[in-house]
């Protein structure tokens, strides 16, 4: 079987197209990486040899030997589903961790996303916590970016706001939303700051830029971003309706939600002490 026909390429194509259609990835905005296992890679006849080696300028040696299907830098998400072999690539992290071997894709000479440091540093961090971790996704959701201009950039305050915008929020991101300061995209520094937050959160706001999220599968991470952005959209709509909240989900309601869905809210943002019976 050829890799182009695999469910991995199909899922990458579908997901990047959905991200584009939602308006979260204008032009070349956004990037996605998906880890493949050795057994998964071994199924394909056309992944035998290295097409070329691509240097990376940080230490990815904790991921040595791992495989990542990743979107290319400068590639438009509206196009990936039509040109996956051009706009995405499958790479293996070399033993030294300072370069990757290209096994498939980037067939016009392309390279992994400029946010590869943030992706790989996040993969390193999350694999320490959860060995099922496979996906990192970055995009530019409109309402979340808008919120980063109008709201205090405080993790407790933004997490509690988004939990109260809809009943789904607490269940989907009980640990809340991490926030880093505004930083220059594509740098190792933003990668390290993001990865540090990923020790506690699965979703991190990049103020005035976008969101970084991680998880086990494409659908799970997409759903996580979708839920955060929907909560931000509800907030935008409330503000556009005049901003007066007449009634809302209360802290007691959040505690009840946590209890019935078996999730543990971040204790720094919501104490479970006063649970109603
Ligand atoms: P790339 O085109 O390099 O993936 O960058 C897009 C982006 O969103 C940068 O933050
Ligand atoms: Zn971006």
Image (cartoon, grey):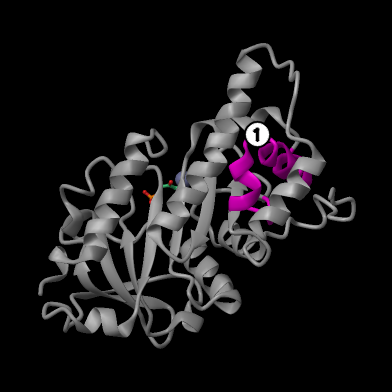
The answer to if 83 sits in the magenta stretch is no
- The quarter in which the N terminus is drawn is bottom left
Residue that label 1 marks: 165
Q: Residue at x 59, y 35 (%)?
A: 231
Q: How many marks?
A: 1
Q: Tell whether 13 sits left or right of 209.
A: left
> Dot 1: what SS?
loop
Mark 1: few/some/many CA within 10 Å (<14, 14-19, 20+)? many
Would you say residue 115 is visible in this rendering? no
* Horizontal and vertical percent position of residue 249: 73, 34
The residue closer to the viewer here, 72 or 41, is 41
Q: Residue at x 53, y 43 (%)?
A: 227
Quadrant of the rendered image containing residue 233: top right
Q: Residue at x 32, y 50 (%)?
A: 15
* Horizontal and vertical percent position of residue 256: 75, 48
Q: Residue at x 27, y 69 (%)?
A: 90
Dominant secondary-structure state across the stretch colored magenta: helix
User: Vertically, is 26 above or below 83?
Assistant: above
The answer to if 155 sits in the magenta stretch is yes
User: Vertically, is 100 above or below 108?
Assistant: below
For this orientation, the residue located farthest to the right is 274
Q: Which residues are magenta?
A: 153-176
For this orientation, the residue located farthest to the front is 277
* Horizontal and vertical percent position of residue 258: 71, 53
Q: Tell whether 142 sits left or right of 55.
A: right
Quadrant of the rendered image containing residue 190: bottom right
Q: Tell whether 112 sits left or right of 1.
A: right
């Amino acid at each position: 079987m050829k890799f182009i026909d695999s469910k991995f390429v199909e899922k990458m194509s579908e997901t990047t197209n959905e991200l584009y259609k939602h308006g979260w990835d204008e032009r070349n905005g956004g990037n996605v990486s998906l880890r493949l296992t050795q057994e998964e890679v071994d199924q394909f006849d056309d992944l035998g040899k290295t097409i070329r080696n691509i240097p990376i300028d940080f230490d990815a040696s904790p991921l040595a030997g791992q495989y990542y299907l990743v979107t290319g830098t400068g590639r438009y998400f509206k196009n990936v589903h039509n040109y996956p072999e051009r706009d995405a690539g499958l790479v293996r992290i070399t033993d030294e961790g300072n370069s990757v071997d290209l096994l498939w894709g980037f067939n016009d000479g392309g390279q992994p996303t400029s946010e590869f440091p943030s992706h790989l540093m996040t993969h390193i961090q999350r694999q320490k916590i959860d060995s099922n971790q496979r996906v990192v996704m970055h995009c530019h959701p409109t309402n979340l970016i808008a919120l980063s201009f109008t709201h205090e950039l405080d993790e407790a305050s933004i997490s509690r706001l988004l939990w109260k915008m809809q009943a789904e929020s607490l269940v989907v991101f009980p640990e809340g939303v991490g926030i880093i300061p505004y930083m220059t995209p594509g740098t190792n520094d933003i990668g390290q700051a993001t990865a540090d937050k990923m020790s506690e959160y699965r979703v991190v706001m990049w103020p005035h830029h976008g969101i970084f999220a991680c998880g086990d599968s494409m659908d799970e991470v997409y759903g996580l971003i979708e839920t955060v952005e929907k909560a931000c959209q509800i907030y935008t709509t409330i503000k556009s309706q005049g901003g007066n909240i007449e009634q809302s989900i209360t802290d007691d309601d959040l505690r009840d939600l946590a209890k019935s869905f078996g999730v543990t809210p971040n204790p720094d943002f919501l104490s479970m002490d006063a649970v109603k019976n």
